[in-house]
Amino acid sequence: MDNGNPSRDAGHPGTKEYIDAIRDELRAILASRYFCHSRRYPALLRYLVENTLAGRADLLKERTLSTEVFERPASHDMTSDSIVRYTVGEVRKRLALYYSGEGRNATVRISLPLGSYIPEFLVDGVPPDENGERLSLPGLNPPKDGNSHSEFEAQLQEGLGAYVAGNGLAGPGAETREVADPSTDHASAPRRRVWWLGTLVVTVMLAVVVAVAWRHRTVQSQSPVSEFWAPVLRNQRPVVVCTGAVVFAKNNFSGVVTAGKADDYAFVSMQNASALAEINGLLERSGATTKLVFSAYEPVTELREHSVTLLGAYNNEWTLRLLQPLRFHFSQEPVEAIVDQAHPKLRWSRNHSLPYSGADDYALLARFRDPTIDGWVVALAGLGRNGTEAAAQFAVSPHYMEQLRHRIGQDLGSQNIEVVMKVKVIDGKTGAPSILAVHTW
């Protein structure tokens, strides 16, 4: 008999304390780094949680979510627009990351089961396992003062069966069997009850371990390239690909200078064209539409609320402008160089004593959310054209992106990232890039 245990009562579904605890946990999740830089993921998770708490779980269907959360017309084709399924998958992944990190000690947890849009709320319904993790089966009502344990035990058994079946832990043709009683003596009923509940707890713990391991493996199996580009692809508007243009200038070290609005016959180099093809191909394979613009002609109003990919540095005024506040950025004085704001004496520049076609290049790869345009920016820019080509190759390569993920940890999807790299140049051809410095925030 539970004699008014306050921790049980606070976790009782439907009470004000229970709902307040869930809302407190929701606020903590939305303030975490996995959600605070996005609009779409918090909006969806908040909608799912609040409607479930209000008893409107029957509204949580794909078409309703597409119209209410993502403002799609009621008649739109959901087979060609998978925004709900994609965003739910991202929310599920981010919840797993949150609870494997800063939320690992939460006593109330919000989960989004596979194949469902209805969240589950996990509380202290059973004792913790050896790692301190806790689980409560959905809809579990602990007994209150004056109630028998029989109803509570029936709910436990029913909940366990649903949990095991829902996670694919029961084999084909498996049946739900009652646990055999070690004795039929009515005097030993309390002892049998403890034995039965102990067996149940161990089984639940094993089920949780298997389910969490499976879900963790699913999160980790995402391609590092997909993870890096995921923030850019969240916005359903076209991705703006902004590149610079040049005109010939024989007296300049690179042989060209940035083209302005008044220049006729501006062009891009073969290296920039290669970078453009790499990025445009990746974005289109990911299902995004792209809009190609030249930096000299593009006002800030055309970039606002879009995801933007910037190609080139000194031929692209938007690269120079948007990267200026960051730790690593481009400087023009006394020579063109990448500088480190945290260490002003540290500079990376090309060797001007060598021919342009033989001097190693340096490049910046950056992905960050920019307040000027209120959108995500990916910058792929070299001191010269070889660096720009290498940065684009780096950004679409699973091999190089895995190196970056290993360097900064497993989370490529939500952090702001800057990477300084060195690029070998041989007879004007772009060689392999190598990472020199990384900064995340």
Image (tube, rainbow, N blue to C red):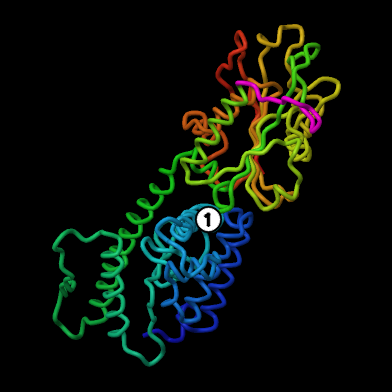
Q: Nearer the viewer, residue 197 or 36?
A: 36
Q: Which of 18 and 68 is in front in this view?
A: 68
Does the magenta portion include 267? yes
Q: Which residue is drawn at 41% across and 87% down?
A: 144
Q: Is residue 357 left or right of residue 399?
A: right
* Label 1 Cα neighbours within 10 Å, binned few <14 / some 14-19 / many ≥20: some
Q: Furthest residue to the right?
A: 334
Q: Is residue 261 left or right of residue 133?
A: right
**Residue 256 % position (x, y):** 75, 18
Q: Of helix, strand and loop, which one carries label 1?
A: helix
Q: What residue type is labelled 1?
A: Tyr
Q: In which quarter of the image is residue 179?
A: bottom left
**Residue 172 % position (x, y):** 16, 59
Q: Is residue 417 left or right of residue 63?
A: right
Does the magenta portion include 169? no
Q: Which of 106 and 326 is in front in this view?
A: 326
Residue 417 visible somewhere in the drawing: no
Give the quadrant of the C terminus. Answer: top right
**Residue 122 % position (x, y):** 44, 69
Residue 392 visible somewhere in the drawing: yes
**Residue 433 % position (x, y):** 58, 22
Give the quadrant of the N terminus. Answer: bottom left
* Above/below status of 365 relative to 11: above
Q: Residue at x 74, y 12 (%)?
A: 351
Q: Is residue 279 left or right of residue 421?
A: left
* Above/below status of 232 relative to 144: above
The residue pinned by badge 1 equals 98
Q: Furthest residue to the bottom?
A: 146
Task: Write down the region rendered in magenta.
Answer: 259-270
